Image: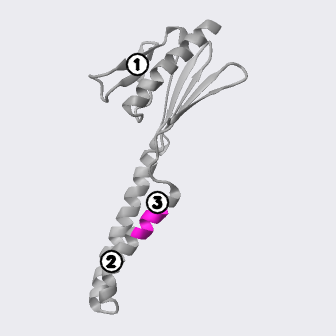
Amino acid sequence: MPYRWSDAPDGTKRLRLTPWSALSRSGFAWFIGVTAALIILPLLSVIATPVFWGLLPFVLLAMATVWIALKRSWSDHAITEDLVLTPDLITLTRHGPRKRVQSWQANPYWVSVHIRPQGGPVPDYLTLRGEGREVEIGPFLTPPERRALLPELQTALARTRQKA
């Protein structure tokens, strides 16, 4: 699962959510290397001719575009969500792309967990509602992962309310 629960000695529960990453650093290097080889391979037949020098800038531009697009995609998926649950306060902090931080806090006694199987922006839209606001949790999770997280969140909230 792309999320992990942890307990602190003081009774604080933490939940960290991160999206799946399909491309590791070594995978990125391999992809760029193989792509470069496949693009340059046809150029070998025209090496040391004026045609080679005419095509080379376009090949380099294509490689640079692939590199930049992959790096941008990678940074756009550098998202983490941290849920901190104490008897007095629940805090959800989302660290988004390009250092964007969003935070929400509420009293856990008044917080409820909701899932909308249909009608939300995504299937099985999972939200926390409290303090007059409703915030989404785990927008990058798959629908089965959101359904699996729902009872875990409800259980964690119920246990926190019992401690208060």
Q: Nearer the viewer, residue 72 or 13?
A: 13
Label 2: which residue? Answer: 57
Q: Earlier in the sequence, mark 3 or mark 2?
A: 3
Amino acid under label 3?
Phe
For disc 2, the neighbor class at 10 Å (few under 14, some 14 to 19, many from 20) is few
User: In screen coordinates, is 87 left or right of 61?
Assistant: right
Is residue 88 covered in magenta?
no
Tell me if I can see residue 164 in this picture.
no
Amino acid under label 1?
Glu
Q: Picture coordinates of residue 92 (x, y %)?
A: 52, 25
Identity of the residue drawn at 39% across and 34% down: 142
Label 1: which residue? Answer: 134
Are the residues at dot 3 and dot 2 in contact (C-beta closer than 8 Å)? no
Between circles 3 and 2, the one closer to the viewer is 3
Is residue 31 covered in magenta?
yes
Q: Earlier in the sequence, mark 2 or mark 1?
A: 2
Identity of the residue drawn at 30% across and 74% down: 58
Q: Picture coordinates of residue 26 (x, y %)?
A: 52, 60
Tell me if I can see residue 156 in this picture.
yes
Q: Earlier in the sequence, mark 3 or mark 1?
A: 3
| Image disc number at residue 32 | none
Are the residues at dot 3 and dot 1 in contact (C-beta closer than 8 Å)? no
| Secondary structure state at the residue bearing disc 2 | helix
Distance between the alpha carbons at the discs numbered 2 and 1: 51 Å
Q: Is residue 21 above or below residue 131?
A: below
- Which image quadrant is residue 138 in? top left
Label 3: which residue? Answer: 28
Range of the magenta residues? 29-34
Count the numbered circles shown: 3
Quadrant containing the C terminus is top right
Identity of the residue drawn at 42% across and 12% down: 132
Amino acid under label 2?
Pro
